[in-house]
Image (tube, rainbow, N blue to C red):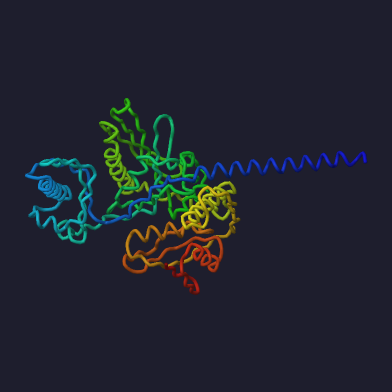
């Protein structure tokens, strides 16, 4: 009897230790859920090769508001055509080349119209006047873009929605030679892509994260915003960096007169960054870091793997809420499925009626369980495009994972075709 009490005490101590460990794990998971839950993402616009000219200011008068607006739009089209390098053409001919008019800001009265407009010309129709419009030089490897906001002593990427994130989401690369990979910032993106990651040197971590987004290397666009006083001017100091070693590429400064002018300043800054990145590409600086290729991605860091799994679990839960399968706020287990350690590449064909469908399908496939990376190898707008998917498992398991995402899957000997 005398020995039973110490043994019982030891059992209670072990039980208490297990309960404490479970409590810590639950707290960590709850923190991660809180960090990725909510509306924090901004989906990037679909890339287009059309010719975009933004920031055109117009101020016209007319007998009526509609007449003043019509005059302003014609004037904006002429200015945009001149900025695009087009020859002198009548207004009717310029209008026939038009693809869209973007209203960035406008004010109208009975006889006056003032606005800041963006004009987009259809490249296929305008190319005969602009020398064909081909992109000169080689296109870069896919580059993951991290938009860092530095303000009031904090550094943000996707933790909360912010104007710098929105500026890059709305950035239209057109015929830029830089192949940008722009995450939406939703789901698990805010766990993986943080300012701390931007300063990390570990090739293993970087390789695993780049594989998640189908990128070869990373570009870092830092916007340091200094508010002079509430409602007053905002000074922006912008720094371009590159690669896992955070190499400096260039710096410039801009200023917005007030908070209302901040989006326009940031939109201008994205264009300046694109110019810096393209110049770095032309100078041979934007070559993927060879040490990233030497990283052993099959031996992924357990902590990073857990972050990836938590992000995927939260995304699956949000999808279930959107589908009405569970109620918002309802408690439920979040399964963290262990991933196989061996990854392989598979070919997946998918229908691509427009550019937006390409981006949507890529994002959907990347979020499937077991998928480490997905990148297009052939794009046919209006037809069938092809992507390569890096998956930790067999072709049968990849097919099952895509079916779980709601796809109809046709399986061949070494490839899949998916549709909805």
Tell me: 235 left or right of 397: left
Tell me: 338 left or right of 126: right
Task: Report the front residue among 58 and 392.
Answer: 58
- Image quarter hosting the C terminus: bottom left
Above or below, comparing residue 388 to residue 147 in the picture: below
Q: Which residue occupies 32% across, 33% down?
A: 236
Tell me: 387 left or right of 380: right
Above or below, comparing residue 181 to residue 344 in the picture: above
Res 399 visible: yes
Which residue of the protein is positioned furthest toward the top in this rendering?
Answer: 229
Which residue of the protein is positioned furthest toward the bottom in this rendering?
Answer: 413
Percent position (x, y) of residue 262? 29, 36
Res 291 visible: no
Q: Which residue occupies 93% across, 41% down?
A: 1
Task: Report the front residue among 61 and 32.
Answer: 61
Percent position (x, y) of residue 232? 29, 27
Q: Which residue occupies 35% across, 40% down?
A: 163
């Amino acid at each position: 009897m005398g020995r039973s009490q110490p043994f019982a005490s030891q059992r209670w101590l072990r039980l208490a230790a297990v309960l404490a460990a479970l409590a810590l794990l639950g707290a960590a998971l709850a923190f991660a859920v809180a960090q990725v839950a909510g509306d924090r993402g901004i989906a990037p616009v679909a890339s287009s090769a059309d010719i975009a000219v933004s920031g055109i200011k117009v101020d016209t008068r007319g007998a009526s508001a509609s007449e003043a607006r019509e005059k302003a739009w014609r004037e904006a089209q002429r200015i945009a055509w001149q900025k695009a390098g087009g020859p002198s053409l009548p207004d009717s001919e310029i209008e026939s080349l038009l693809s869209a008019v973007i209203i960035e800001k406008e004010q109208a009265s009975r006889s006056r119209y003032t606005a800041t407009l963006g004009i987009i010309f259809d490249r296929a129709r305008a190319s005969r006047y602009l020398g064909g419009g081909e992109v000169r030089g080689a296109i870069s490897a896919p580059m993951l873009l991290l938009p860092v906001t530095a303000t009031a002593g904090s550094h943000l990427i996707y933790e909360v929605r912010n104007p710098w994130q929105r500026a890059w989401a709305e950035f239209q690369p057109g015929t830029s030679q830089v192949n940008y990979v722009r995450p939406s910032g939703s789901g698990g993106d805010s766990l993986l892509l943080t300012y701390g990651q931007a300063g990390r040197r570990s090739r293993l971590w970087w390789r695993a994260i780049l594989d998640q987004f189908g990128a070869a290397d990373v570009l870092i666009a830092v916007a340091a915003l200094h508010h002079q006083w509430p409602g007053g001017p905002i000074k922006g100091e912008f720094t371009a960096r590159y690669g896992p070693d955070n190499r400096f590429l260039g710096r410039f400064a801009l200023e917005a007169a007030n908070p209302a002018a901040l989006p326009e300043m940031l939109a201008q800054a994205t264009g300046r960054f694109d110019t810096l990145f393209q110049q770095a590409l032309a100078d041979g600086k934007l070559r993927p870091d060879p040490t990233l290729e030497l990283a052993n991605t099959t031996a992924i860091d357990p902590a990073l793997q857990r972050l990836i799994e938590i992000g995927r679990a939260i995304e699956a839960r949000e999808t279930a809420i959107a589908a009405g399968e569970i109620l918002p706020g309802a408690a439920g287990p979040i399964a963290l499925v262990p991933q196989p350690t061996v990854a392989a590449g598979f070919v997946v064909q998918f229908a691509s009626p427009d550019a937006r469908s390409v981006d949507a399908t890529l994002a959907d496939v990347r979020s499937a369980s077991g998928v480490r990376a997905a990148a297009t190898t052939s794009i046919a707008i209006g037809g069938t495009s092809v992507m390569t998917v890096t998956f930790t498992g067999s072709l049968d398991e990849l097919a099952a994972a895509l079916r779980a995402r709601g796809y109809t899957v046709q399986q061949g000997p070494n490839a899949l075709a998916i549709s909805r």
